[in-house]
Image (cartoon, helix red, strand yellow):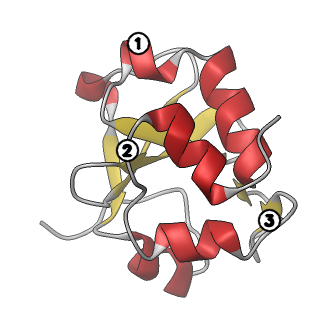
Amino acid sequence: MVSSVEDVEKWLGQPLPEPYRSFLAGVTDDFPAANDRTLVYCSASVVERNETYQSRLYCPAHVAIGDDSGGMFLILSLADGSIHRAGMGAMTPDCLEPVAPNFTAWADAGFPYEGRHPT
């Protein structure tokens, strides 16, 4: 059973980028964002959702860390810490849409799921 950040990192086979790692370590249940639509997953949900949707197979180097309650995953790039979104049925690198340049920017903005960050 997954219950910690370390369990998630063991499952992934690599460390999570900061500051997402610290955020995940501080939550024990899924975190409903202020907009009442975005749900940021706890450790157990991260593994369960990614196993269910086979994200390691279809979207390597990324992990679903939440959803918008409407069929879109919120996805963290394990390479650079950026946040993206993609449909739950189309979670492949070519389908990712930018949301925020990093977890801090996403959290500070209230965990929005629409729009693009500046390039």
Q: Vertically, is 65 above or below 102?
A: above
Q: Against 83, is 54 above or below?
A: above
Foreground tag (3 vs 1): 1
Residue for point 56% across, 76% down: 22
User: In terms of image quadrants, where is residue 89?
Assistant: top right
Callout 1: helix, strand or loop?
helix
3 and 2 marks in contact (CB < 8 Å):
no
Quadrant in the picture for residue 118: bottom left
N-term mark: 1 or 2: 2
Instruction: Name the spot of residue 15 as percent of width and height, x first.
Output: 40, 53
Q: In this orientation, which residue lies closer to the viewer: 10 or 24?
A: 10
* Outermost right residue: 29
Say left or right for 96 vs 8: left
Which quarter shows the C terminus?
A: bottom left
Q: Is residue 69 visible?
A: no
Say which of marks 3 and 2 sits in front. 2
Between circles 1 and 2, the one closer to the viewer is: 2
- The first of marks 3 and 2 along the sequence is 2
Which residue is under mark 2? 14
What kind of residue is marked 2? Answer: Gln
- Percent x, y for residue 68? 68, 48
Which residue is label 3 attached to? 31
Residue at 61% across / 74% down in the picture?
23
Q: Name the residue under label 1.
A: 57
Q: Where is residue 58 in the image (x, y as percent from the top left)?
A: 39, 14
Element carrying mark 3:
strand
How busy is the neighbourhood of tag 3: few (under 14 within 10 Å), some, or many (20 plus)? Answer: some
Real-space CA distance between mark 3 and mark 2, rounded to the nearest whole angstrom:
23 Å
Task: For marks 3 and 1, give the CA distance.
Answer: 26 Å
